[in-house]
Amino acid sequence: GQNIDQPTEMTATEGAIVQINCTYQTSGFNGLFWYQQHAGEAPTFLSYNVLDGLEEKGRFSSFLSRSKGYSYLLLKELQMKDSASYLCAVALLDSNYQLIWGAGTKLIIKP
Amino acid sequence: KAGVTQTPRYLIKTRGQQVTLSCSPISGHRSVSWYQQTPGQGLQFLFEYFSETQRNKGNFPGRFSGRQFSNSRSEMNVSTLELGDSALYLCASSFDRGPYEQYFGPGTRLTVT
């Protein structure tokens, strides 16, 4: 079967750094997405990794290790507006281009 | 460029009724996917439409159906509503099929009483 695991909830302090992990076990792999979803709003795209390594985009970075079935999203210089849920999704390598979604990690930022 | 729009935004229905939700994708996007989101469950994939054809379907009962029109607009229908169908229904569009970024609409909040 297909499985994606993320922590349910994390708490961090404004100005600090937080790492949100995502582990996956899927039949086939065609990249991993991270989305951000503020409460009551639609998810918005953050990053897409298909090769191993770290990709940096401003305060946000995403890392992928295909051999370990592991990814993380790194948020630096946390701001209150970063309080949101962070969704990890794996694209399967099949003819249906299916996405498998994790349940999401709710990140709470405290002053 | 206008984003993905969904109507209605909120809906209250009674058990046993049926409902139709609408989604207009970003202009030029040909793939439309539908998701159900409930607290603690994450995004559950319903189906994907491309060129007016259902290309992929999630593990939902036949009460859930959809269609796509020639202008890429899509509708989903839920018949014989159950209390457990209460959820946020999200529509997402992407340029093409494949591992492309999906753009989500604001969703339709369905409450079944």
Image: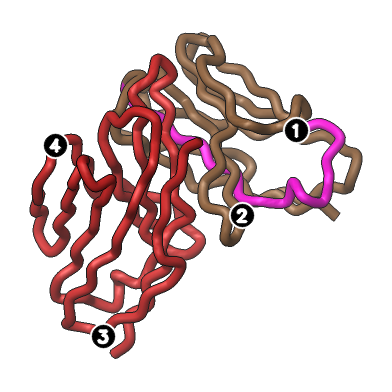
Q: Colour of chain B?
A: brown
Q: Is circle 4 on the same chain as circle 1?
A: no
Residue A98 located left or right of residue B109 = left
Callout 2, which amino acid?
Thr
Circles 1 and 3 in contact, beta carbons < 8 Å:
no
Q: What's the residue at 24%, 52% (across, down)?
A: A71
- Report crowding for label 1: few under 14, some 14 to 19, many 20 or more residues within 10 A (C-alpha): some
Q: Is circle 2 on the same chain as circle 3?
A: no
Callout 4, which amino acid?
Leu
Residue bearing mark 1: B78
Q: Colour of chain A?
A: red
Callout 1, which amino acid?
Val
Q: Looking at the picture, does residue A108 appear above or below residue A43?
A: below
Residue B47 spot, x, y in % from top left: 56, 27
Residue A93 located left or right of residue A54 = right
Q: What's the residue at 40%, 50% (across, down)?
A: A43
Count of numbered marks: 4
Residue bearing mark 3: A13
